[in-house]
Image: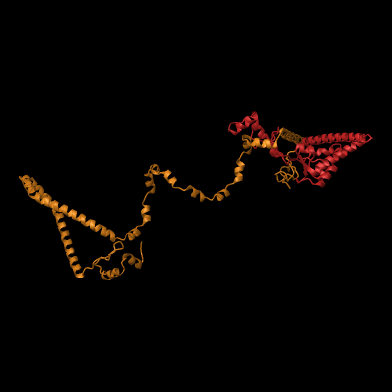
Amino acid sequence: MTYPPAQRARRRSPCGPQRARFDVSMDDASHSPGTDLVPLTGAHVIPRRLARAADVALGAGARATGLALALAGSGRGALRAGLGIAASLPGSGLARDAVAAATRPLAADGARVREQSVAQAQRTLERAVPAIVALIDVDAVVQRIDLDAVVATIDIDALLSHTDVDAVLRRVDLQAALDRVDLDELVARIDVDAIAARVDVNAIVQRVDVDAVVEQTELGTIVARSTSGFASEALDVARAQTVGVDTLVTRIVDRLLRRRAEGPLGPALLVDEPDAAAPVEEPAPPGKPPP
Amino acid sequence: MTRARDALRFQGHYAGPVSRLLAYAVDTFLIGVVYTAGLALLRFAVDAATPWNLNVEGVVFAIGAFVWAAVYFGASWVGFGRSPGMSLLGLRIVRADGSDLDRRHALIRLIAFPLGFLTLGAGFLGIVLRRTRQALYDRIADTAVVYDWDAEAAKLRELAMHRRSPGATGAQTSAAHDGGAPAAGAVRARDAPADV
């Protein structure tokens, strides 16, 4: 993430005036100006000449080391051949034993020095690493990381395929989770009126078989006790039978009169059919549109 | 055969000739019984309370019967929109459009009603032949006769009767409710057409 210069300077210099003085003296390219990640908080200012001499010494040492390594690399084959020849000479075994005996104290001293050096380096790192970490601006590190790119490299499907969800769920204590849920509060937050407003009660009632309810429960008996007697039931049957005979007579008459279209069932205000009271029209002959 | 529960859907339909004929028969029976009984009571009262004898016969008897019938029909039609016989058969007189019968049209129907007889019965043929089941006097008075009884209560009574008597019909309906194959004739009320 890139910051404007003022903001970057502010982020690198949390200590204000000291940071400004350091910036003035560190404008030379030979000095490390620090980075966004490791601001030079509390660094000592080195005299320029001393720094120059140290750089020269380090440069000379680096070049000498490189030259020695190059020579050693080129002479490694010759040395290996010479050692092979020497090993094939008579008495080479005795010479090797003698050399081993002679170098054993040296090897012991070297091992001890190496262990001390490792321990010293370990102690040095234990002191240095926290200091280095303390110098690092973690926020700057995090902001330099493109989390989207990091996430994009993660194969979520592969990750999930390796995940045993059942095992995860088995470890979840649902009972404990439910115990922590306040159902009363949850229910109090539910807008029952809104839910009820979305329920089509008429549709539900339409699906109820009222006949079955009356017939299969005591409700029918209650209704019967309150409204009926033998005479009422007989009258119901008689009326229904009469309606049936009426319908039969009507069918016979319609057949005799060769009526095809069904007429109005009743007055318009009493039946649901919109055209019940409309005059009956004879069907139009084929090929002739109705008027 | 039409069950009481199936008759629910006939409410408001034009009443057929058989229902109207039976209703008229009941009315005629009631008119005759009441007229005869009333005349007998009147004769007994006159004989008991006066030295005269009340002898109503012939034309006077017929005129008296005619007047009594006119009062009978007129009062019931104007007051209730139906005669006692119609009430028994579950019929009601309405205007041709289905609205309630008012006094004016009831009186017009009452005046035109004898035309059915004066035409030697031809005035009644409309009840059989016309789709609107209107007799001559119905057309004059712009009225119609429809089925109109408390069929909902009748249906409940029939269902309750099946509940009380676990006979063949109850067993059939129970089988239908339990999801099993209903026996022959055990068809759900709302699914079955009227079996006439």
* Relative depth, front residue between B30 and B38: B38
Residue B13 in the image, given as x and y percentages of width and height: 73, 40
Specify the quadrant that holds the N terminus of chain A.
Answer: bottom left
Can residue A87 be spotted in the picture? yes
Residue B72 in the image, given as x and y percentages of width and height: 83, 40
* Relative depth, front residue between A272 and A68: A272
Chain in orange, by letter, is A
Query: Is B30 left, or right, of A168 in this rendering?
Result: right
Splitting the image into 4 quarters, where does residue A254 fall?
Answer: top right
Position above or below: B186 against A131: above
* Relative depth, front residue between B23 and A174: A174
Position above or below: A137 against A190: below
- Residue at point 16%, 57% (across, down): A69
- Residue at point 81%, 37% (across, down): B125
Residue B121 in the image, given as x and y percentages of width and height: 84, 36
- Residue at point 87%, 40% (across, down): B67
Chain B: drawing colour: red
